[in-house]
Amino acid sequence: MMKKTMLWLGVLLPAVIQAQEIAPLFPATPVPDRIILTFAGEPATTQAVTWRTDSLTAKGIAELKPASPHPSREVTPKVFDAATQLLQLPGATAHYHTVNFTGLQPATAYMYRVGDGRNWSEWLHFKTASRGFTPFSFIYLGDAQNDHKSLWSRAIRAAYAHDPHARFMMHAGDLCNRTNVDSEWGEFFYAGGWIYGMMPTIATPGNHEYYRDENRTLTVTKLWRPIFAFPENGPHGLEERAYHVDYQQMRIISICSQSFLLNKADSVSQMAWLEELLKNNPNRWTVVTMHHPVFSSKEGRDNKSLRDALRPLFEKYHVDLVLTGHDHTYGRGIGEQSARGKKISLTGPVYLTSVSGPKQYVPALDGWQQRAGANTQFYQVVNVEENLLRYQSFTVTGELYDAFDLEKKKIRERAD
Ligand SMILES: [Fe+2]
């Protein structure tokens, strides 16, 4: 009897596994999903949105009008045609549609919906940036990477609940674990749902967003560019991965650290591009995000070549924050040893690593860190004022874990 049961298992098991691999876990339909706001142009006058439909739905349009508390339809929306691309992945072929709303008024709330004229999303809201400086806040998240539905959902939802008026959220890479696996992005969108359609995303790619193609060429996941409409203002060949956004007097620079570390040409091009961006920077604040940390917070790791190349530029041009991930721990420091809680005069940035997902590593308690953490999911809220930047890190259960203020002094000297 026992022998017969085992035989049955032996015959049936492969068939079951095969069926699971083929069935799409997050099937696309004619109704838009995976709706996500990004900045593809100037945040005061433009706003990009991307969404997904099934491959039979080839048309994409978006309707836009000033946000109104009145639900009636007295204002005729402006209609924008989408740029549509087909993404073919095993069991997950879909269309991705992108509209970049242009000609918008600064500091203005809009409502929009996306669809094909028959199937529509709900109406969603966003607000454009102001032209000059206005205080604002943003959310910074370390690696999401795994178990988005089960556990990472806590981080994105806690961050949104904490600061629903944050003007954008920033991911420091490794948003997913396995390159080109659609179901992981399905979980990513399940976890954040409509939040992405209301709060723009800025993301830099991590090592887990990269793979070697059939020619052994370092290649970003096939999902990256269809899902995100990021600026194409970086070095050639690194479009939508190395880029910058100027948001209300804050320059945000995404460095593609994976290609920086693994491709000589990409490190050379990014160094030249970065120096120009830092040298000719009319903004009050400067934040760099990249996946790999300048100072590692995981035991046994050290990105020396990255640090040797970038740290002098960060210090020379007075970068304020370097927001990274990769190490699956929490670390905050200035690169040198200093007492906790002390007021310090800085010319260079504060370096941070954080983690929002459940994957956790053993921390390195090196001297560069004034605050370290392990085995905890975090989110960060950064409040930006004219001369003060208030940084706070929270656990996903809402406890304040770390905080510091950066006070900007001698702005004229810094701009020189
Ligand atoms: Fe990583």
Image (spheres, rainbow, N blue to C red):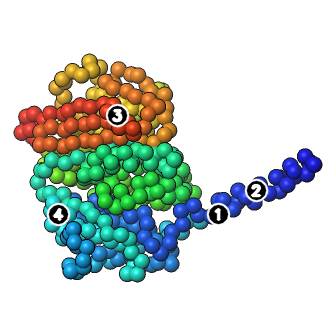
Q: Residues within 10 Å of mark 4 (few under 14, many from 20)?
A: some
Q: Amino acid at mark 2?
A: Pro
Q: Nearer the viewer, residue 111 or 210?
A: 111
Q: Estimate the x, y position of residue 59 in percent, counting from the top left.
A: 41, 79
Q: Amino acid at mark 4?
A: Thr
Q: Residue at x 15, y 37 (%)?
A: 388
Q: Secondary structure beneath disc 2?
A: helix
Q: Nearer the viewer, residue 280 or 4?
A: 4
Q: Is residue 74 above or below residue 91?
A: below
Q: Earlier in the sequence, mark 3 or mark 2?
A: 2
Q: Residues within 10 Å of mark 1 (few under 14, many from 20)?
A: few
Instruction: Give the spatial CA distance, label 4 vs label 1.
Output: 45 Å
Q: Nearer the viewer, mark 3 or mark 2?
A: 3
Q: Which residue is mark 1?
A: 22
Pointer 1 residue Cβ closer than 8 Å to ligand 1:
no
Q: Which residue is mark 4?
A: 108
- As drawn, the label of residue 14 is 2
Residue 353: which quarter of the image? top left
Q: Which residue is mark 3?
A: 399
Q: Earlier in the sequence, mark 2 or mark 1?
A: 2
Q: Estimate the x, y position of residue 116 in percent, counting from the top left.
A: 39, 79
Q: Nearer the viewer, mark 1 or mark 3?
A: 3
Q: Earlier in the sequence, mark 4 or mark 1?
A: 1
